[in-house]
Image: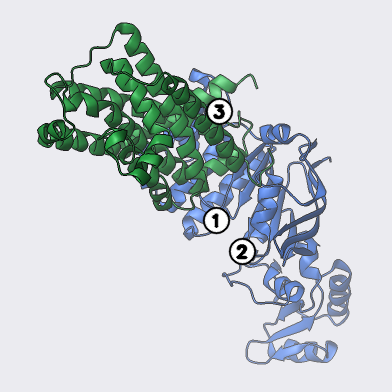
Chain colours: A green, B blue
Amino acid sequence: MSYTVQDTATMFRRNMRHAQRYPALALGPLGMPVIMLLLFGVLFGKTFKAGLGGSGNFDYIDFLVPGILLMAIASGTMGPAVAVCTDMTEGIVARFRTMSIFRPAVLTGHVLGSVLQILASLVLVVGFALLIGFRPNASFGDWLLTIGLLVALTIAFTWFAVALGLVSKTPEGASNIVLPISLVLPFLSTTFIPLESMPSGIRWFAEYQPFTPVIETLRHLLLGTPSESGNGWLSIAWCAAIAVVGYFWAQKNYNKGTVA
Amino acid sequence: MSAAIDVRGLRKSYGEKLVLDGIDLNVAEGTIFALLGPNGAGKTTAVQILSTLIAADAGEIRVAGHDLHRSPDEVRAAIGVTGQFSAVDGLLTGRENLILMADLHHLGRDEGRRRADELLERFDLVDAGSKMAATYSGGMKRRLDLAMTLVGNPSIIFLDEPTTGLDPRSRHRMWQLIRELVAGGVTVLLTTQYLDEADELADRIAVLDHGQLVAQGTAEELKRMVPGGHIRLRFNAPEEFALARQVLPSAAPNEESLVLQVPNDGSVHALRALLARIDDASLEVDELTVHTPDLDDVFFAVTGQPTPHEPVLQTAGTMK
């Protein structure tokens, strides 16, 4: 197992080269968060601010950005799911499996490549948000915690997406199976409106799904919005749980029926 | 000679469907072994198991001296596999594919690049080396695939239907490459549904049908298992032909071409007996040809079913 790092690095380079050859899969997921920023931040911003009873120093764009960052992560999961499924339906993974290489390297290479791409898209989203008026008042330490939490959530959802890609039979199926992540979780959370203004059923879901505590924690870190003290730990617990389930589910499926 | 591959009692089923039903195989080092059978016979499953891709349900398997079940990684280090469906990375160029393999074999940067260029040269892919593999023709993909298999210098190579779907020229090129490999000391186990391919390449052939080995041996041994062999005698003069018909009454005559077909199994003993009778009668034979049954006949006989019929290469030996 002395080649753990070397083999993982090789697989990572392979996936970065794929992203370079096939940029549509890497850049495609940027579309939704950017459009949402424009639509809700710029176009409906004033209406939402009024509707939410915002006072003078409340800016809807600031309220919006943390949820949009999570939306970027969620729509970024399509990349690894489709890429892993495509890999599995082609002969190349069969070849890797008959070679004496560090076994988890194939999937870990995918995860590393995707995490890097999603983080790059987060940087672009933040840059765009700053352009259209996003004004966080976070300290350096707050920014570090924000980055740490976003990286953790990205790793967790990427492993989960890889597992979903492995259980999909076709790349089309893989792109559909991750849709609930990018559609349900960001919209039925506090991305656009606070919990208090939701109808009770949706409110119940939003309160207990993983995105809400993360969004609340990010608001607290970036804007100093008051947040329940448990949200930070709850966010970390969600990230750890999703990462562990995703990782083991993925490895189990990757090794299914083979000589491990 | 020691065995490169030794298999006893290999079994595999998918749910209710029994795919391999107790296979025994022994492949000697440095030889070509062909697993011959129609589609669905279990050839690919056998290769997938022997190459550590999927697990067997039962059976003792040793590959390159290692127990496949207990030390799959040692087996993997010794083998190379070229599957039925091309195992190249379409988004990488040919050269990048080879370098990827070199990296995974930990050859080091310079050695990996040197090896990649050497293989591109050997497999006529120098011009295509900088193009994405997805743009390659079927024959080029198959050559790149085999080149990738060779990066790690495997001592045993599995080729699953290496020429299926290739045009005749690519096919002969592939045969030539396979022969070169074995000349270099490599052991090859290939699967094929083409009888001529097995006949052309293999030292030993096993015929697989519905998950069972129905025959095993050299091409010659297999051909001798079925009746239908004969010796063809051609004469110049009608009077010699007429005399020969009296000497060999069991032969089937063809008056127009002055040809006699004498039933004969083609063995040395039977051939010597026939030559003795020809000598005794002082017959002037213009041409003598031995016709052993070809693998098609063997296939029909042992599997009892028709096969995808490819043009069969000449299997007759001519004596003058």
Q: In 3D space, how far apart are the residues under numbered discs 1 and 3 (Cα atoms)?
A: 26 Å
| Residue type at tag 1 | Thr
Specify whether disc 1 shares its chain with disc 3. Answer: yes
Q: How many marks?
A: 3
Which label is found at residue B272?
none
User: Which residue shows up at 70% across the image and 57% down it?
Assistant: B35
Please state which of residues B175 and B6 is positioned toward the viewer in this rendering.
B6
Chain holding disc 2: B
Q: In what element is the residue under mark 1?
A: loop
Residue A194: image location, x then y, percent? 28, 32
Is disc 3 on the same chain as disc 2? yes
Mark 2 or 3, nearer chain start = 3
According to the picture, the residue beneath numbered tag 2 turns out to be B194
Quarter of image, res A61: top left
C-alpha separation, residue under disc 2 versus residue under disc 3 = 34 Å
Q: Which label belongs to residue B104?
A: 3
Q: Which of B245 and A255 lies nearest the eye of the viewer?
A: A255
Report the disc number at residue B163. Answer: 1
